[in-house]
Image (cartoon, rainbow, N blue to C red):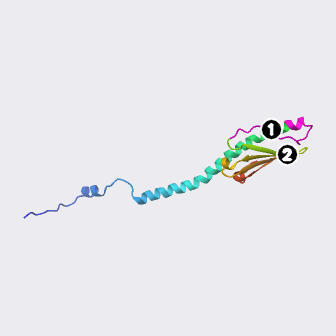
Amino acid sequence: MVRVVKQKQTKEDNMKLTNKSGFTLLEVIIVIIIIAILASVGMPKLSSMTNKAKAKEGLSAIPLIRSDLEQCYLMSNNTYAGCTGNGVVLNGKYFTTFVVGEQDATEFTITLTCPLANCGVASTLIYRNSTKSITGTGAFSAMNLS
Protein backbone atom coordinates (compact mmCIF):
# COMPACT_ATOMS: atom_id res chain seq x y z
CA MET A 1 0.00 0.00 0.00
CA VAL A 2 1.21 3.43 -0.97
CA ARG A 3 0.71 6.13 1.47
CA VAL A 4 0.41 9.76 0.30
CA VAL A 5 1.80 12.20 2.74
CA LYS A 6 0.82 15.85 2.45
CA GLN A 7 3.55 18.33 3.10
CA LYS A 8 2.80 21.38 5.11
CA GLN A 9 2.80 24.50 2.93
CA THR A 10 5.22 27.17 3.92
CA LYS A 11 4.97 30.94 3.42
CA GLU A 12 7.35 30.68 0.50
CA ASP A 13 5.08 28.20 -1.23
CA ASN A 14 2.09 30.51 -0.70
CA MET A 15 4.03 33.48 -2.13
CA LYS A 16 4.89 31.47 -5.24
CA LEU A 17 1.24 30.63 -5.80
CA THR A 18 -0.13 34.16 -5.29
CA ASN A 19 2.68 36.30 -6.70
CA LYS A 20 1.37 36.90 -10.23
CA SER A 21 2.60 39.77 -12.37
CA GLY A 22 0.27 42.06 -14.35
CA PHE A 23 -2.70 44.26 -13.70
CA THR A 24 -6.21 43.30 -12.75
CA LEU A 25 -9.12 44.26 -14.95
CA LEU A 26 -10.31 46.73 -12.32
CA GLU A 27 -6.95 48.53 -12.31
CA VAL A 28 -6.97 48.82 -16.09
CA ILE A 29 -10.53 50.19 -16.11
CA ILE A 30 -9.64 52.79 -13.46
CA VAL A 31 -6.64 53.97 -15.50
CA ILE A 32 -8.81 54.25 -18.63
CA ILE A 33 -11.40 56.29 -16.73
CA ILE A 34 -8.70 58.65 -15.41
CA ILE A 35 -7.29 59.15 -18.92
CA ALA A 36 -10.79 59.84 -20.28
CA ILE A 37 -11.42 62.46 -17.59
CA LEU A 38 -8.10 64.20 -18.31
CA ALA A 39 -8.80 64.17 -22.05
CA SER A 40 -12.28 65.65 -21.58
CA VAL A 41 -10.80 68.49 -19.54
CA GLY A 42 -8.01 69.21 -22.03
CA MET A 43 -9.89 69.04 -25.35
CA PRO A 44 -11.96 72.25 -24.97
CA LYS A 45 -8.82 74.15 -24.03
CA LEU A 46 -7.02 72.77 -27.08
CA SER A 47 -9.92 73.74 -29.35
CA SER A 48 -9.95 77.26 -27.92
CA MET A 49 -6.22 77.60 -28.46
CA THR A 50 -6.43 76.51 -32.10
CA ASN A 51 -9.27 78.98 -32.76
CA LYS A 52 -7.17 81.77 -31.23
CA ALA A 53 -4.26 80.85 -33.50
CA LYS A 54 -6.57 80.93 -36.53
CA ALA A 55 -7.98 84.32 -35.47
CA LYS A 56 -4.46 85.73 -35.10
CA GLU A 57 -3.80 84.99 -38.75
CA GLY A 58 -6.83 87.07 -39.72
CA LEU A 59 -6.02 89.80 -37.22
CA SER A 60 -2.52 90.12 -38.67
CA ALA A 61 -3.99 90.69 -42.15
CA ILE A 62 -6.19 93.63 -41.06
CA PRO A 63 -3.33 96.18 -40.75
CA LEU A 64 -2.11 95.24 -44.24
CA ILE A 65 -5.55 95.79 -45.74
CA ARG A 66 -6.03 99.02 -43.76
CA SER A 67 -2.68 100.31 -45.04
CA ASP A 68 -3.72 99.59 -48.63
CA LEU A 69 -7.04 101.37 -48.03
CA GLU A 70 -5.26 104.38 -46.52
CA GLN A 71 -3.06 104.65 -49.63
CA CYS A 72 -6.18 104.45 -51.79
CA TYR A 73 -7.84 107.12 -49.58
CA LEU A 74 -4.96 109.53 -50.16
CA MET A 75 -4.85 108.83 -53.91
CA SER A 76 -8.66 109.22 -54.23
CA ASN A 77 -8.90 112.76 -52.84
CA ASN A 78 -9.63 111.75 -49.25
CA THR A 79 -12.43 109.25 -49.82
CA TYR A 80 -12.66 105.48 -49.31
CA ALA A 81 -15.34 105.16 -51.99
CA GLY A 82 -14.03 102.81 -54.66
CA CYS A 83 -11.20 101.45 -52.50
CA THR A 84 -11.17 97.66 -52.56
CA GLY A 85 -7.88 96.59 -50.99
CA ASN A 86 -6.90 94.79 -54.19
CA GLY A 87 -3.25 95.48 -53.43
CA VAL A 88 -3.32 92.89 -50.65
CA VAL A 89 -3.00 89.16 -51.29
CA LEU A 90 -3.86 86.79 -48.44
CA ASN A 91 -1.38 83.92 -48.33
CA GLY A 92 -2.65 82.48 -45.07
CA LYS A 93 -3.67 78.96 -44.27
CA TYR A 94 -7.11 79.77 -42.83
CA PHE A 95 -8.27 83.12 -44.24
CA THR A 96 -8.42 83.04 -47.99
CA THR A 97 -10.69 85.96 -48.92
CA PHE A 98 -11.68 89.38 -47.69
CA VAL A 99 -14.19 91.99 -48.77
CA VAL A 100 -14.07 95.73 -48.20
CA GLY A 101 -17.59 97.02 -47.82
CA GLU A 102 -19.69 100.00 -46.76
CA GLN A 103 -17.20 102.45 -48.21
CA ASP A 104 -18.00 106.13 -48.29
CA ALA A 105 -15.91 109.22 -47.76
CA THR A 106 -14.81 108.32 -44.22
CA GLU A 107 -15.96 104.79 -43.41
CA PHE A 108 -15.29 101.21 -44.46
CA THR A 109 -15.52 97.65 -43.12
CA ILE A 110 -13.22 94.73 -43.77
CA THR A 111 -14.72 91.23 -43.62
CA LEU A 112 -12.23 88.35 -43.59
CA THR A 113 -13.70 84.91 -44.23
CA CYS A 114 -12.42 81.60 -42.90
CA PRO A 115 -14.26 78.88 -44.86
CA LEU A 116 -15.90 75.84 -43.34
CA ALA A 117 -13.12 73.54 -44.58
CA ASN A 118 -10.44 75.61 -42.80
CA CYS A 119 -12.17 76.55 -39.54
CA GLY A 120 -14.63 73.72 -38.98
CA VAL A 121 -17.48 76.23 -39.15
CA ALA A 122 -17.89 79.20 -41.51
CA SER A 123 -16.34 82.08 -39.57
CA THR A 124 -15.59 85.74 -40.17
CA LEU A 125 -13.69 88.61 -38.63
CA ILE A 126 -15.23 92.04 -39.22
CA TYR A 127 -13.25 95.26 -38.72
CA ARG A 128 -15.19 98.54 -38.59
CA ASN A 129 -13.16 101.65 -39.30
CA SER A 130 -15.67 103.98 -37.60
CA THR A 131 -15.28 102.32 -34.18
CA LYS A 132 -11.90 100.64 -34.73
CA SER A 133 -13.58 97.46 -33.45
CA ILE A 134 -13.26 93.84 -34.50
CA THR A 135 -16.05 91.32 -34.08
CA GLY A 136 -16.14 87.65 -34.93
CA THR A 137 -18.70 85.11 -36.02
CA GLY A 138 -18.64 81.32 -36.03
CA ALA A 139 -15.52 79.95 -34.34
CA PHE A 140 -14.51 83.49 -33.32
CA SER A 141 -17.83 84.69 -31.85
CA ALA A 142 -16.94 84.17 -28.18
CA MET A 143 -13.41 85.60 -28.38
CA ASN A 144 -12.12 88.90 -27.11
CA LEU A 145 -10.65 90.26 -30.34
CA SER A 146 -9.75 93.78 -29.24
Of the numbered discs 2 and 1, the one sitting upstream in the chain is: 1
Which residue sits at x=57%, y=56%? 40
Residue 46 in the image: above or below residue 2: above
Which of 138/99 is in front? Answer: 99
Which residue sits at x=68%, y=52%? 121
Q: Is residue 82 magenta?
A: yes
| Residue count near mark 2 (Cα–Cα under 10 Å), binned few <14, some 14–19, many ≥20 | many
Which of 125/142 is in front? Answer: 125
Q: In this figure, which residue is indicated by the disc labeled 1?
A: 86
Which of 105/1 is in front? Answer: 105
Q: Is residue 36 left or right of residue 2?
A: right
Residues at circles 2 and 1 in contact by the CB criterion of under 8 Å: no
What is the x, y in percent for residue 89?
75, 37
Quarter of the image with the N terminus in it: bottom left
Q: On residue 108, which mark appears?
A: 2
Q: Is residue 90 left or right of residue 132?
A: left
Q: On residue 75, which mark appears?
A: none
* Residue stretch in magenta: 71-92
Give the SS element for disc 2: loop
Q: Is residue 13 left or right of residue 77?
A: left
